[in-house]
Image: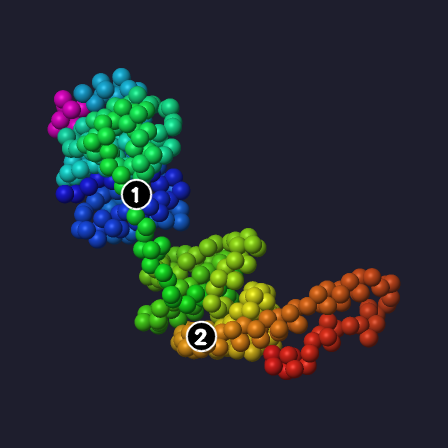
Amino acid sequence: MKVGYVISMKTGMSSFNRDELLELEGYGIPFVIYVTKFRKGPYMPEDRWSVRLPGIAETLLGFAHFLFSAPRRLLNVVVDTGRKRTWIEMLVALGFARDMDRSEIGWIHAHFADRKLLVARIAANLVGKPYSVTVHAHELYRTAKRIARQSALVESKRIFTVSEFNCDLLVRDWKIPRAKIEINRLVLGPSHRNLDSRPRMLVVGNFVEKKGYDVLVNALRLMEQVDLTVWIVGGGPLDVDELVHQNGLDSRIVLFGRVSEPLLSILLDACDFFCLPSHTSAVGEKEGFPMALAEAMGHSKPVLSTTHAGIPEIVPEILVPEANPAALADGIREMIARRSDWPAMGARNRAIALSYFSPVNIATLAKLFGEPVVHGGPSRDQHTGTDSIPESVRIEAR
């Protein structure tokens, strides 16, 4: 039986909706998703899923379709809609119901007993199919269109809800027979019930050419057999999201966008190692020294980068040639193979970072700004900001 799933995607797809549909797919249940409101968000339907959206054209075509194919059902729906004042829901349902008819939907299910339930009920009455609903919580306390929603609950073939507490409310306050209600606590999705033991590599940088996102993507394509989770933080003119999607790496890369400093610190602490594949851009633009590398080193993380610009002056290892996906892939493999060395590498990197990126550097500025203005600039014995760095650390960093 093909199922018509009525949901909302006001901020993308709810994770529990997505996990539920993934599980149903595993049972071999075919479905079409009918979305009452749509906006992209963190969770989205799989590309292989059929998704339908409302629209004026769909509503008009739906009205014409049922006017000729099922005029009595259409008349009953219009009369009932007038009584319950569910005009908006009817306009959405008309377009959905036409598609359900053409797609041979055998059962309609609404997730949430609010507007989605009303749309599902009207569509079900138009196509002459049964419907059910999953009730969460907010629907039980809202008064908007309560009479219409109560009627829709009573007429539904089955009501699923997420707790015994909700079940009692449905029986007591909504006058639903207990036999119609089933407790269904949804599902803990694969990403939550299966512990991810893959190494976590963090990349932080503006979405611009010199940060090497193109090289990173191509390197990961060469590493199909390597289990690795990549976290990317940043934003900018380069469409990294599309780059990841076009190369089929959505399951291996998590894009965070721009984040606040507290969240960045959490990600730096949680990752296993850091990577920044900087390279010279097509117009010759280079890095100076990326502070994202210094921040990762300050968090005691092993780092993987390139022999680009000023990076080798500070980063002792692991460095690979720039703009070389194969070399970057080899570097990632080497990093993963040296898992036992990560604590020592991180401790060394922290010592280097705290030395080279010390408050002494700002003391140099403060001293300059606090001096009387004299011709020829600061005195020759101006403190350079690196005098206090232990020689052993400076040598090792070179």
Q: Which quarter of the picture shows residue 356? A: bottom right
- Mark 1 Cα shell of 10 Å, populated few (<14), some (14-19), many (≥20): few
**What residue is pinned by disc 2?**
339
Which amino acid, mark 1? Answer: Arg
**What residue is pinned by disc 1?**
185
Q: Which stretch appears magenta? A: 66-74
Mark 1 vs mark 2, foreground winner is 1
Q: Is residue 327 visible?
A: no
Q: Is residue 38 above or below residue 171?
A: below
x, y percentage for residue 369? Answer: 80, 61
Quadrant into which the C terminus falls:
bottom right
Residue at the (38%, 66%) spot, across then down: 198
- Is residue 57 highlighted in magenta? no
x, y percentage for residue 386? Answer: 71, 74
Residue at the (55%, 59%) spot, across then down: 265
Q: Which quarter of the picture shows residue 374? A: bottom right
Q: Secondary structure at mark 1?
A: loop
- Is residue 70 highlighted in magenta? yes
Which amino acid, mark 2? Answer: Arg
Q: How is the image coloured?
A: rainbow
Q: Is residue 284 above or below residue 101?
A: below
* Chief secondary structure of the magenta portion: helix
Residue at the (28%, 31%) spot, across then down: 117
Q: Is residue 172 left or right of residue 296?
A: left
